[in-house]
Image (cartoon, grey):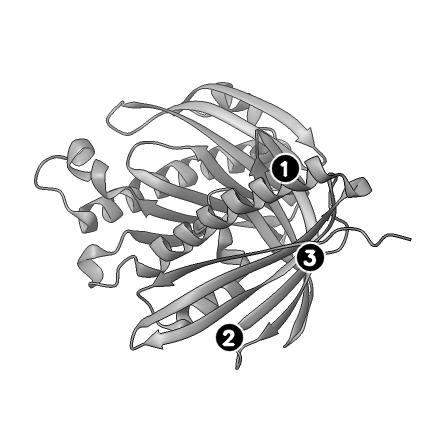
Amino acid sequence: MTRPTTRETAHEITVRAPAERLYGLIADVGGWPAIFPPSVHADHLDRGDTEERIRLWAAVDGEVKQWTSRRTLDRAGLRIDFRQETPRPPMAAMGGAWIIESTGPGECTVRLLHDFRAVGDDPAMLDRIDRAVDANSRAELAALKQHAERGSDGDEHDTFLTFEDTVRLEGHVKDVYDFIDQAQHWADRLPHVTAVSLREVGPGIQILAMDTLTKDGSPHTTESVRVCVPYERIVYKQTTLPPLMAVHTGEWRFEEDGAGATLVTSRHTAVVEPRAVTRVLGETADLAAARRFLREALGANSLATLRHAGAYAAARG
């Protein structure tokens, strides 16, 4: 019996950052949506010191795909091996490794290895997978390099921003969650939302498009992929962004406080688009001003949404 064909590929890139920093970025799958453009959300199903199972959601070719992988982590060896548990057709098997090697003070090489097979051992399909792996690997390594090197010249060059706000709302967690989950009603319920479209594209997966107004009345059109876990959290990643941001991910977390009220945390992670700073904020604006602007604007919109969510929940008793 002929053994199915396994194809192997290798890609690498040099990064001006310590090898330990690159290992940390790759090991922390929760941070991947802020690094890799297709990544929407990742969480752990099982987690140990050296072995883990992770579940990932990614936007690929207009679809949101989900899969589960097992990973082996070797911090001392700066290596992470991975293998998908149930590959999606046309792949019959998919695995590989991230390998980081220090090449000098503050510099390293990252290698990304893949091995894969095609369903039915189809040569044409194997070539198709090969092309997709090549394109994705190059894009992932370039995005990883850009993220790792961002801000290396000092805080004044830092484009990264993350923050969260927590509020206590009178009302049951189900009603507060429903207000955030049922975003198709936001144009009628939120004054800063002028138009909205919500599509369910899978269990707990939504595509949310909306037009919003900033504090100065400027309109913005955004689109997000949202992963919803009823009454616990909604995570999202904007795939169509306002011009000032290169990346924007967020999360709503819900928790009963034991006294009939709900604690909600709104978390944002954003990356400033440096080329848009002066165009959007004026000739004297810098990255620090852009971070302050985004902290205020994103936080204000989320807190406004939560005020209305609280009023909705309170009215429902």
Can you give x and y, in whole percent of width and height, for residue 301 in the image? 38, 36
Residue at the extreme right of the image, as rendered: 1
The percent position of residue 296, horizontal first and vertical second, equals 29, 43
Secondary structure of the residue carrying numbered label 2 = loop
Q: Position of residue 276 (x, y in %)?
A: 22, 36
Tag 3 near tag 2, CB within 8 Å: no
Q: Quadrant of the C terminus?
A: top right
**Frontmost residue, 136 versus 86:** 136
In the image, residue 158 above or below residue 50: above
Q: Is residue 291 left or right of residue 110?
A: left
Relative to 215, say whether 98 is above or below.
below
Marks 3 and 1 in Cβ contact (< 8 Å)? no
Q: Earlier in the sequence, mark 1 or mark 2?
A: 2
Q: Return the disc, 3 or 2, that comes first in the chain's sequence.
A: 3
Which residue is labeled 2 in the image?
78
For label 1, the residue is 128
Q: Secondary structure at mark 3?
A: strand
Q: Is residue 307 above or below residue 188?
A: below
The alpha-carbon separation of the residues under discs 1 and 2 comes to 31 Å
Which residue carries the number 3 mark? 69
In the depicted view, which residue is nearer to us: 281 or 121?
A: 121
Mark 1 and mark 2 in contact? Answer it, CB < 8 Å: no
Q: Quadrant of residue 97?
A: bottom right
Which tag is nearer the camera, tag 1 or tag 2?
A: 1
Eyeballing the image, is 164 above or below 312? below
Q: Residues within 10 Å of mark 1 (few under 14, many from 20)?
A: some
Q: Is residue 8 visible?
A: yes
Q: Amino acid at mark 2?
A: Leu
Mark 3 to mark 2: distance in Å?
A: 19 Å
Instruction: Look at label 3 and name its amino acid.
Output: Ser
